[in-house]
Amino acid sequence: MRIRRTVPVASPRAAQAVDLHANVSAAMAAVLFGASVVAVRVAVRDVPPVSLAVLRMGQGSLLLVGVLSVVAPELLRSRWERLRLFALLGFVLFALFPLTFNIGLQHTEASRGAVMLATMPIWSALLGRIAGERLAGRQVIGVLLSVVGIGLAFVEPGRALGGDAMSLVGDGLLLLTGLLGAL
């Protein structure tokens, strides 16, 4: 038996404020995520990728748990059955994602890495399709245009596709990072 929750209808003015807040938050997240590509590319020159991943994700996790325990402690409670899924999600997003991100950026340029990470929406659409979601025609066209755009971004006059072998490894790891982020 499913319990239905009623959703209160917000006034148009309140809805606009929520939309503005959501859009500003999304823009800030995009800027911070984009800046992290350059920051990590610089950092992996001096700090080993594993150490950097532990420092970034460990400190972020502690900060998040600390803030949540004060602001919304009820969000830290969960049923035991769900802990296995949370552990898997944590492993993917707080171990595999930062490791592939850091190691990949050790072997390729930040600009290439940023484009590889921009494949997350493509991966999300493809994973959604595998999970049974239907893509509208314009969504399929959008995915195809994204793939073509990413391909064109890597065609550089006078440079062989992919560059050296380690650059290809870095590109591949960052593509995997995009997939992990979408997962």
Image (cartoon, rainbow, N blue to C red):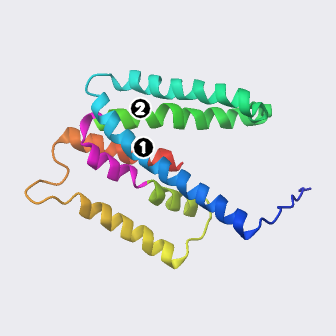
Q: Relative to residue 24, is residue 109 drawn left or right?
A: left
Earlier-in-chain disc, 1 versus 2: 2
Badge 2 crowding class, 10 Å Cα cut-off, few under 14, some 14 to 19, many 20 or more, is many
Quadrant (top left/top right/bottom left/bottom right) for the N terminus: bottom right
Residue 3 left/right relative to 122: right
Q: Where does the image place residue 169, in percent across and percent down from the top left?
A: 27, 40
Camera sees residue 82? yes
Q: Please state the horizontal and vertical placement of residue 120, each as a whole percent of the image.
A: 45, 53
Image height check: is 101 above or below 130? above
Residue found 32% across the figure and 22% down from its top: 47
What residue sits right under mark 2 in the picture? 99
Residue 179 location, x and y as percent? 46, 49
Q: Quadrant of residue 153?
A: bottom left
- Secondary structure mostly taken by the magenta-highlighted segment of the chain: helix
- Closest to the observer, 119 or 38: 38
Residue that badge 1 annotates: 177
| Range shown magenta | 106-119
Q: Secondary structure at mark 2?
A: helix
> Looking at the picture, which amino acid does disc 1 mark?
Thr
Looking at the picture, how far across and down is residue 33, in whole percent?
A: 43, 44
User: Which kind of residue does numbered mark 2 sit on?
Assistant: Leu
Q: Secondary structure at mark 1?
A: helix
Few, some or many residues within 10 Å of mark 1 (<14, 14–19, 20+): many
Rendered view: 133 above or below 171: below
Please tell me in which quadrant of the rendered image residue 130 appears.
bottom right
Farthest-out residue, left: 158
Q: Nearer the viewer, residue 167 or 18?
A: 18
Compared with 112, 152 (above or below) is below
**Is residue 104 visible to the viewer in this orientation of the structure?**
no
Find the distance from the CA under tag 1 to the CA under tag 2. 9 Å
